[in-house]
Image (spheres, rainbow, N blue to C red):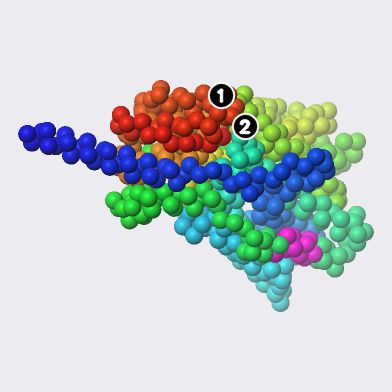
């Protein structure tokens, strides 16, 4: 009798859990936001303008952060001329001044990624976006007005305020990525193009770098600063004015986000789903969710974080050699004392270096668009793209390491140049795009921004470590290190990263709700289909929870997703099939 009563209680508990999850799931399965499904215009120009606006406006935050972050590298050569006692002779400033600026900025970025990434899951995407924009505006103003009674005081202030601006930049990473993912998921016309939508928003980072370089060149050309001797007043106006121009779109996005930006529909629906289960305090959800995240998502967070770490490590090495590659171009046909072994040409003018930097930025920008327009294709996907990009990095940097001495000679200097540009292309058409997309896509809505911020912070730590390590080794070893970072990226991606191309984000949320309710075993949907799991997750047995009954959603996806809005997705709860409508990506 006791055993029978116990079984009856277990059955009642499972039935109650199934009912709670059904009620919560119904709030996730709302009709997509048709307000954003703008009517199709016959005018080609109008359609193109609307297409540009669909990612340029949401991506303006990434544009501005890149504009300011890459400005330090673009302007450092100019500062060595204008503030020679500080930047070149190091009479008034420490030798590691440029490193101090970079490290301070990166520390601010890491803090922002962790702090604002955490709170954006609580205050919402709208106010998280407003917070990041407001912080960047304050930091940008302080950068522009940096001053002091001498060079040392000026650059002490400039270095300190980089931390403030960095906090805003760091917050923009998780907020922009999660917002773009959720906007695509809640908009009918973008559901099948989620990866494209997110990467196009991210591509604005490439435009920020390119536009900053172009603005500096234009201002210097306007003052006639083509060659030595340079006018110190013109150089000061150049760097301050270039930053001031970048402040204009920053103020614009702050006003837009405060006055016009709507809250994420996906984020709001997730809050309603939690309320349907009894609220955030039900069953100790508030404190249990972090333990559940570590238990069930540790491999995903580890994979996205370490992939980003090795990418930033290698990418930082790539950027360290930018001046070497660019100045090496001018050695052809102009022998000088010291022989061809010395590949850096000190005679290259400021504008010359910036022009080649502009070309490199343009090549990299092409990679963003290759990534955007192929990442949702079944023959590509997120996982394959990331592995491909890392593999090319391994091959290209390995060639540079093995043939380093030959590539430094005038006969092969253009080959050296090609390898550098080609590595930039594959970096964008690969890990730079996917490492920004995946941390938000692989996490549940409730913790999406925090997980992205964590992975991004680990990635930025890779840049810091690279800065230390690369100062201890010679140039050839730097190429060896960067090459094996690419190989490590391939291995990490293969083992830990699942390919969620085509998987509805709400499937992951349904699985997460079952975890929060303490009945993960009741979820048997597509989020645990072996196709959408990493090899490590399949090895851990998560794929065994999937039931073939749920292939309806998979078949609809294979057919292009047209059936998904008409057919309910069968989610089996302990033997009882609950019909839950799903809008498939």
Q: Where is residue 171 in the image (x, y as percent from the top left)?
A: 56, 56
Q: Position of residue 325 (x, y in %)?
A: 76, 40
Residue appearing at x 44%, y 52% in the figure: 271
Residue 72 in view of the camera: no
Q: What element carries label 1?
A: helix
Q: Which of 38 and 480 is in front in this view?
A: 38
Q: Name the residue under label 1.
A: 558
In magenta stretch: residue 182: no
In magenta stretch: residue 244: yes
Query: Is residue 98 placed above or below 30 in the rendered structure?
Result: below
Which residue sits furthest front? 566
Task: Answer with the quarter of the image where residue 143 lies.
Answer: bottom right
Residue 231 in view of the camera: yes
Q: Which of 448 and 482 is in front in this view?
A: 448
Q: Which mark is residue 469?
A: none
Give the alpha-carbon distance from disc 2 to disc 1, as whole Å. Answer: 13 Å
Q: Position of residue 419 (x, y in %)?
A: 74, 31
Position of 491 with respect to 549 (left or right) is: right
In magenta, the rendered stretch is 240-251
Residue appearing at x 55%, y 61% in the figure: 127
Q: Name the residue under label 2.
A: 376
Neighbourhood count class around disc 2 (C-alpha, 10 Å): few under 14, some 14–19, many 20 upward: many
Q: What element carries label 2?
A: loop
Q: Quadrant of the N terminus?
A: top left
């Amino acid at each position: 009798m006791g055993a029978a009563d116990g079984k009856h209680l277990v059955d009642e508990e499972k039935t109650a859990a199934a009912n709670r999850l059904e009620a919560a799931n119904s709030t996730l399965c709302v009709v997509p936001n048709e307000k954003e499904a703008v009517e199709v215009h016959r005018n080609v120009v109008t359609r193109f303008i609307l297409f540009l606006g669909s990612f340029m406006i949401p991506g303006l935050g990434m544009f501005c952060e890149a504009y300011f972050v890459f400005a330090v590298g673009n302007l450092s050569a100019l500062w060595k001329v204008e503030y020679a006692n500080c930047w070149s002779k190091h009479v008034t400033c420490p030798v590691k001044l440029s490193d101090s600026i970079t490290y301070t900025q990166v520390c601010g970025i890491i803090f922002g990624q962790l702090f604002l990434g955490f709170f954006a899951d609580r205050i919402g995407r709208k106010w998280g976006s407003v917070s990041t924009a407001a912080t960047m505006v304050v930091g940008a103003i302080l950068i522009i007005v940096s001053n002091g009674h001498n060079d040392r005081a000026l650059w002490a202030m400039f270095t300190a305020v980089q931390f403030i601006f960095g906090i805003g930049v760091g917050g923009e990473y998780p907020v922009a990525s999660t917002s773009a993912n959720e906007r695509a998921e809640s908009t009918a016309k973008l559901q099948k193009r989620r990866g494209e939508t997110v990467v196009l928003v991210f591509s604005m980072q490439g435009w920020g770098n390119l536009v900053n370089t172009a603005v500096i060149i234009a201002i210097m050309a306007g003052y006639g600063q083509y060659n030595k001797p340079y006018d110190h007043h013109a150089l000061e106006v150049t760097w301050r004015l270039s930053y001031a121009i970048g402040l204009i779109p920053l103020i614009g996005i702050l006003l837009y986000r405060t006055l016009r930006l709507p809250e994420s529909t996906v984020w709001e629906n997730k809050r309603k789903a939690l309320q349907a289960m009894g609220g955030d305090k039900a069953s100790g959800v508030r404190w249990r969710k972090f333990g559940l995240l570590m238990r069930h998502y540790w491999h995903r967070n580890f994979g996205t974080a370490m992939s980003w770490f090795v990418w930033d490590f290698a990418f930082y090495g790539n950027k360290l050699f930018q001046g070497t590659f660019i100045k090496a171009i001018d050695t052809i046909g102009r022998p000088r004392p010291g022989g061809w072994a010395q590949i850096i040409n000190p005679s290259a003018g400021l504008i010359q270096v910036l022009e080649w930097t502009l070309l490199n930025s343009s090549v990299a920008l092409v990679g963003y668009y290759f990534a955007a327009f192929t990442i949702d294709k079944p023959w590509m996907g997120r996982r394959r793209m990331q592995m491909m990009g890392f593999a090319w990095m391994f091959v290209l940097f390995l060639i540079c390491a093995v043939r380093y001495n030959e590539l430094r000679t005038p006969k092969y200097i253009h080959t050296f140049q090609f390898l550098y540009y080609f590595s930039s292309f594959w970096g964008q058409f690969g890990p730079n795009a996917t490492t920004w997309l995946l941390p938000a896509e692989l996490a549940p809505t409730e913790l999406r921004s925090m997980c992205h911020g964590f992975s991004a912070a680990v990635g930025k730590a890779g840049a810091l470590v690279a800065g230390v390590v690369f100062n201890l080794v010679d140039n050839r070893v730097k190429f060896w290190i960067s090459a094996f970072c690419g190989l490590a990226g391939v291995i990490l991606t293969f083992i830990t990263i699942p390919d969620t191309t085509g998987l509805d984000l709400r499937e992951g949320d349904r699985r997460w709700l079952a975890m929060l309710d303490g009945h993960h075993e009741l979820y048997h949907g597509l989020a645990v289909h072996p196709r959408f799991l990493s090899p490590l997750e399949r090895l851990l047995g998560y794929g065994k929870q999937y039931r073939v009954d749920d292939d309806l959603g998979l078949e609809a996806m294979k057919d292009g997703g047209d059936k998904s809005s008409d057919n309910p997705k069968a989610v089996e709860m302990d033997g009882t099939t609950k019909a839950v409508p799903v809008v498939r990506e």
